[in-house]
Amino acid sequence: MRQMETWSAKIDMRDLSATYGTPLYIFNRAQLRRNFIIYAELLKSTSNVFYPVKTNPSMAVLETLAAEGSGVDCATGHEIFLARLAGIPVSRISYYSPAPDICLAENLLKAGASVVLDAPSHIRKLEERLNDQKFPGKLFLRVNPGNLPGYLEYAEYQRYTAHSSPLSQFGIASEEVIFCLQQTHLTFSGLHVHVGTQMDNLEIFEVCLDFLHDLADIINENTSHSIEILNLGGGLGIPGRQEEDYPSLTSFTKIFASLMQDRFTYRLEPGNSLVGDTIGLLTRVVTRKTTRGRGWGIIDVGTNQLLKVTMAGFGQTVLNAEHSPLPRGGSDAIAGPLCFAGDVILDRTDLTGIQEGDPLFLTHCGSYCSAIGSRFNGYKTPGLLMMEEDKVLGLVQSHEDLCWEPDLQSFKPDILKSVDESFAIPIEKVEKMQSEYLKEKQHKDNYRFVSFKKVAPGTYDVSVDVRSPVSFISGPFALRIIGDAAIVATIQELGKESKDISVWGNRFTLSLDGILRANRIQKCQISLSPFIKSLGDKTRNCWANWSLGDGRFFGSILITI
């Protein structure tokens, strides 16, 4: 039986909530590494573990797994982009979608990635695009086995998670596999099955692995394909509450290892069981009230991050500031801050002693929380605080900025404006309203890099002497400084001695949370992701995060070379 995580017992909820604010995700990197090692040892290679990015696409999670040598399972080009920026090579990417981009699938196969297909029409389209070209990647067929054992215990959410149901939209029916493979000239080298999410029954994995062994033999005997790799997907569940019974990783690996055969390479795609217990959610009680005898505790996060709890019915443990679980019975309840009645996290509990302002901690929030979060009622994605065992490393992801939300960034206000209200402003008046600094003095802004030090892979600390006719660093001046620093860092990362190529910044973000003074030395930091070659063309991209001064100026750049 898998136990609840214990690492959160070491955190000081009151101190962290006062220092970093709430709601706040807290990520224990060491727990993720422990979970990953178990899977990697089972599969005899770190590269046979393919983490589903959909589970939690945080760059902190992806970079941790990249450093461990993990692969990733991606469903979209965006997930692939994030994984590659995190340092995961194309050869360790597997792409599956029930509505795939066939052009993307073609480019991935040509670059050495794995692609999973599960519809005859998609196979035909890919075959037409490749036109008998060989490819270094691996092609998998996703199969729907049919009648597999199900969950041991019924839960409301299973109608959303039973991916291997005989009538689900995923996979090719097992009885149609041979005919399907006999109709194509593409070379398939692997089979893929996914039993579902939050599975509590180890028997389904045993039956499914036996099924794949038998199906591979039939395919190898009756078609031109040679099946060498078996991908059993993911699906192993974890408890949301201590009383829930889910198999431990040890019991899963013991059974799986006993069924493995030397003639096959095995892959797994653990999501919930890998990252679920590595992240928790720190929150705060905003309101305590009683309505006709029922006590309520309203906290500052709800369905906007906990959809799987409030709407799908996943179990959830809530700890008080002394790390004791709140009871599952009583006349009180905990609700989120959203304006609808279903935003309830615990419908029956006892809130005796809980006051407004008290912190609470929700365990096992690493999977399918932030990944399917929303901005309902204008709530933003919480920041992510990283820990190493009991040591706080700091905010690895800031609280989401109001100004960068899609509703504002993608808005085209000119469509709504009436042209009837247009009139010309006299240029004489315009000149009186212009900034004297931007018009007349900005060209006198100057800077000089005093020191440029590489402090970590892709990360540079820079000292810059900033000179200006005004006492502050303007936004345009800041862009010049950090743009040039990013160019120097890029050229250095490429191993060049001087700038002999074009370096383009084609997406910039710039946040100025205060005033930075000019005419003094300021600190600047540039952190570059790995460079990734665009699929289908010759350009390369990287993502640069930067800060200037004491961190009040910060932002990002998408760099293209």
Image (spheres, rainbow, N blue to C red):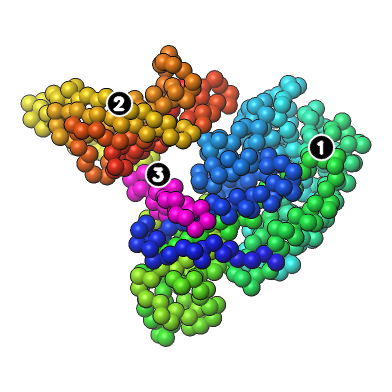
Q: In the structure shown, which secondary structural element does the residue marked by tag 1 occupy?
A: loop
Q: Which residue is mark 2?
A: 449
Give the SS element for disc 2.
Answer: strand
Q: Where's residue 308, x and y in %? A: 55, 61
In three-dimensional space, the C-alpha distance between marks 1 and 2, rounded to whole angstroms, equals: 55 Å
The residue located at (58%, 23%) in the rendering is 536
Q: Is residue 360 covered in magenta?
A: no
Image coordinates for residue 404, horizontal then vertical, percent: 36, 44
Visible in this render: residue 224? yes
Is the residue marked by circle 3 packed among few (<14), some (14-19), or many (20+) residues within 10 Å?
A: few
Residue placed at 54% from the left, 42% from the top? 63
Image position, residue 306 (x, y; %): 50, 61
Camera-side residue: 10 or 163? 10
Residue at horizontal 66%, vertical 43%?
Answer: 50
Q: Which mark is residue 406?
A: 3
In which quadrant will I find the N terminus? bottom right
Q: CA distance from mark 1 to mark 3?
A: 44 Å
The three-letter code of the residue at mark 1 reads: Glu
Q: Residue at x 43, y 35 (%)?
A: 455
Question: Can I make out residue 307 in this image?
Answer: no
Front: mark 1 or 3 = 1
- From the image, tell me which residue sits under label 1: 228
Give the residues in magenta.
380-406
Q: Nearer the viewer, residue 474 or 468?
A: 468
